[in-house]
Structures are given as C-alpha cells and as structure tokens.
Image (cartoon, rainbow, N blue to C red):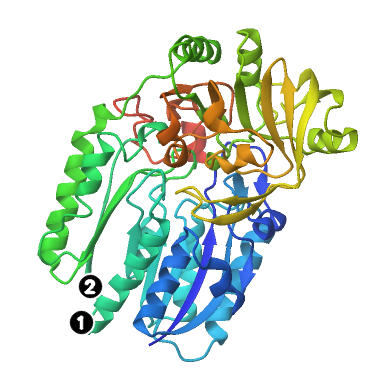
Amino acid sequence: MRVAFAGFLHESNSFASAAADMAAFRQGGGYIPLTRGAALREAARGVNLGIAGMLDYADRAGWDIVPILWTGAIPSAPVTREAFETIADDIVQGLADCGPIDAICLDLHGAMVAEHVEDGEGELLARIRAARPDLPIACALDLHGNITPQMFQHSDIMVGFRTYPHVDMAETGWRAAAALDEMLASGRKWAKAMRRIDFLIPIAWQCSETEPARGLYRMTRELPEGVATASIFMGFPAADFPGCGPVVLAYGPDALAVQAHADRMAMALTEAEADFAGRSYDPEDAVREAMRLAVSATRPVIIADTQDNPGAGGSSDTTGMLRALIACGATDAALGNFHDPEAARAAHAAGVGAEITLPLGGRSGLADDAPFPVRARVAALSDGHVHATGPYYGGTRIDMGPSAALEIDGIRVVVTSHIAQMADRNFYRMVGITPEDQKILVNKSSVHFRADFEPIAETILVATAPGAMPLCPSALPWTRLRAGMRLRPMGPVFKIQEETQQQ
C-alpha cells in the first residue's frame, strides 16, 4: 500500500494568555520541530510520538510511505489564525498533490482550538475529507482529546492513548496503523460508535496509574469479539466550546458488538464519576508537609505545581511555589522548569558564581501572581540542549535555549528560555542538579512527570499555586460549553446565559 502520513498537534487552553504561533510550532517545545517530507522519517525515529509508531508499523508492513508534514507546539492559548491556516493548508495541499495513495494516517491531539475555528481537528479532517473524499483515514490521538461529532464523521478510525502519563504515544500510533491495515484487509469500512459523557474531569485525577482511570482503561484492552479497537478520551477541561468533555469510541466489523461495548464503557465512566477525586494542598501547606516528610525520607518528596503546568497551557513562570519554599525555609530543594528568558540571559551574562538581582517570572498576567524580586547566585549554566530519555519524552532531543540554575536561599531553580514541562530528570541534570539527591523537588507538571520521577519519589503531593490551569475546572469562566455539562465530577451544571444565547 501507498499511505500518506501527517501530524498537527496542539492542546489549546481557552483561558491561557499566550497563543501558539508559527514560531511555537517551528520550535516544538518538547516535540520534534516542524518537519516536512522525507526528513520526517528520521526525525521521528525512536521517539515517543504517535507518528513514530505509525511509521514503524508502515516499515514492518512494507508500505510505501508518503510523509507530508508533522508539527506540534506546547499547550497554550488557542492557535493563531495564521499558524492554523498555514499548517492546515500545507497538509491538505500535500495530500492533494502526492499522487495515488490508498489511505491516510494522521497524528493529532484532539483538543486543538484556533482563534477562528473552535474545533481545530474537526475542521482539518473536513478539509482533508473534501480533498481526498474516498480514502480511509486513521488517527492517533491524545486521551485528553475533546472528540467532536465532526471529527468522528470525517475519519474512519480514531485510536487514543491508554496511559497518562503518556508513555504509549508511539504504541498508539502503531495500533492506529495496525487497525487501518486490518480494516483495509477486510475489504469494507468498520462500524463505529461514539458516546459523550456529561461531566468534566480534572486532569490531575485522570492519571491511569490510579483508580478509577486504571480500571476504565482495561476496557480498551479487553475487547469482545467483533470489536477491533476502543478508546476512552477523558477530555481536556480547558477548551471553552461545546465539544469539550469526555468521549468513548469503539470500532470493529460487528456493528452490534461495537455499539454494545461503547455503551458499557460509557456506563462504567459515568458510574465512576464520584471517584475522580484526590487531595491537594495550598502552596505553603504543601511545602510544610514536604519538609515534615523529608526529615525521615530516603528519597525526594515531590510537589506537583499542577496549576502552572505548561503541558496544559500554563506559563511555567508563576512564582507561588518558589515564594512558599522561601517563606517556609526549605533547603536542599529544587524547582523546574521556570520559564524566564530574561533571567536566563542575565545569568549567562554574569557567569557562574556571580550574584544577580532581578525580578523573576510572574509575567503571565494572572491576577494572583507577579514577578518575584530575588537575589540569586548563578550556580550553573547550560545551552539547554537536553536528551530527554525518560518514559514520557522517550528519547526526544529538546532545545530549551540558554538555561541556568539560580540558587536562592538554598533553593535551586531551573530557569529556561523555552517552555517544556518538567517531565524528565535530565532537565535538572542539564544544570548540574542531581534530582535523586534533593530533599524536595517542585515540578511544574500535573501527571506526566510521574513516569520518570515516581521511581525516585518518597511520595507525591499536589499543590495549587497560581496558574492558568486550575485543578478544578469549575473555577474557569466558562461561556461556551454545551448545556448540562457538570463543571467537575458531581459538581454544578453549566447553564447557557441569556446573553450568550443572543450572541
């Protein structure tokens, strides 16, 4: 078979401050940079991305690979009109011009919103379907995808991650390509089913290593006869449009079995609503608890700075946790990644060992955050080139730009010029910090860090310092959800305001 491959990934937070422009997609921010044509095969080799698994399957199956384009940017405010139109046009035109092909494999996120298009993947798929109307389309997607009816309509197979932290991104791409191959071998398109769920799930409680998600995801592996693939999408609860929220999908040759399994998954997810809960701490309470535990701990106590998670649209520069560490007198502590290009430049200009005074971070525009004046010693410098070898990034080479370790009252802060969430221990090591030797680590991440850090953690605490991604979705100023959605598990119901209806 001759199969075309493309990818366009972005998780869009409607309430974040900085949009994803073309520069963000060219740089990648934890993904491989924007790559076109034949260079895609080598760029994706050996990394934990859906496109890598798709291409690996294609190699094994002996397909003739037609690579078009792959790009992704770190989660942020919605994609700019220019970036969306440029990338979408390149993909659609590439698919239109690539000659005879038998099918299309797409690596997408599922929760992309653009400034002018609220359902990014739905719009992209509609354009691709218009350009190549008769071709089967298989998609690999993030389990945080807000899967819409338009996405479901314009694709033939959609396969989601089963793990959060996402250690199975490449595996999901493989499964999507394998499902496409199986469907094509059958000689007919499969039956498919979609069910939407009526409550938003906080991302910190979506972790697939704990219940209830762990048990729910078993239902995507243990499939009845006649069902070829099934997925549960927990959704990304910060995209303000009617398609936001959890969805389950099922595909296979037996229409009755497919519909029945979709019903079972939807019922199980609905019945687990009250179980999506966990404990969180205010910043100083989190630090005091970490310090108490660290007295007898043999490994680091890790605090998740969950609301400033750049993997969910956070700016990765809010100062709440740093202020709490200093106020509580914490020692042998490290915090990362802290995005402040100006501070990184000042550190490089001053050199290792120098002391510098500057306002650190706090430039997100959040009402409850502000730059933090500090006097810091430049403990280490780095060019920011990181080979992220942990299970989440899976070998991706990431450019964080000029970076430094700033020591402030016994606390070392990883300051970077580019943004990526602290989900790999090598981000600490790049500036001379051995994470295993710290009493306390504060990671700007919600869940992905667990893949590489849980093996070294004494315990993990979740803190709610200021950030663009509130732990509880009901704290967000929603205006565009579909009526009847509960804003958190067992929580209040979203009601469309009269003025919203009139617009």
Tell me which corner region of the image, top left, top right, bottom left or bottom right, holds residue 362: top right
Residue type, numbered disc 2? Trp
- Residue ID at (36%, 32%): 205
- Counting from the top left corner in percent of width and height, residue 408 is at 73, 19
Instruction: Please give the residue where the numbered disc 1 appears in the rendered image.
Output: 186
Which of the pair 37/347 is nearer the observer? 347
The answer to whether the residue labelled 2 contacts the one labelled 1, judged by CB atoms less than 8 Å apart, is yes
Crowding near the residue tagged with mark 2, few <14, some 14–19, many ≥20 C-alpha atoms within 10 Å:
many
Whether residue 458 is visible: yes
The amino acid type found where label 1 is placed reads: Ser
* Circle 2 or circle 1, nearest the eye: 1
Residue at horizontal 25 percent and vertical 77 percent from the top? 183
Residue in the foreground of this view, choosing between 232 and 384: 384
Where residue 351 sits: x, y (%)? 86, 34
Element assignment for label 2: loop
Q: Quadrant of the N terminus?
A: bottom left
In-image side of 235 versus 37 (left or right): left
Residue wearing tag 2: 190
Using the image as rendered, state which of residue 42 and residue 486 is in the foreground. Answer: 42
Above or below, 112 against 97 in this view is: above
* Residue 77 drawn at (x, y percent): 61, 43
Q: In which quarter of the view is residue 345 placed?
A: top right
Point out which mark residue 167 bears.
none
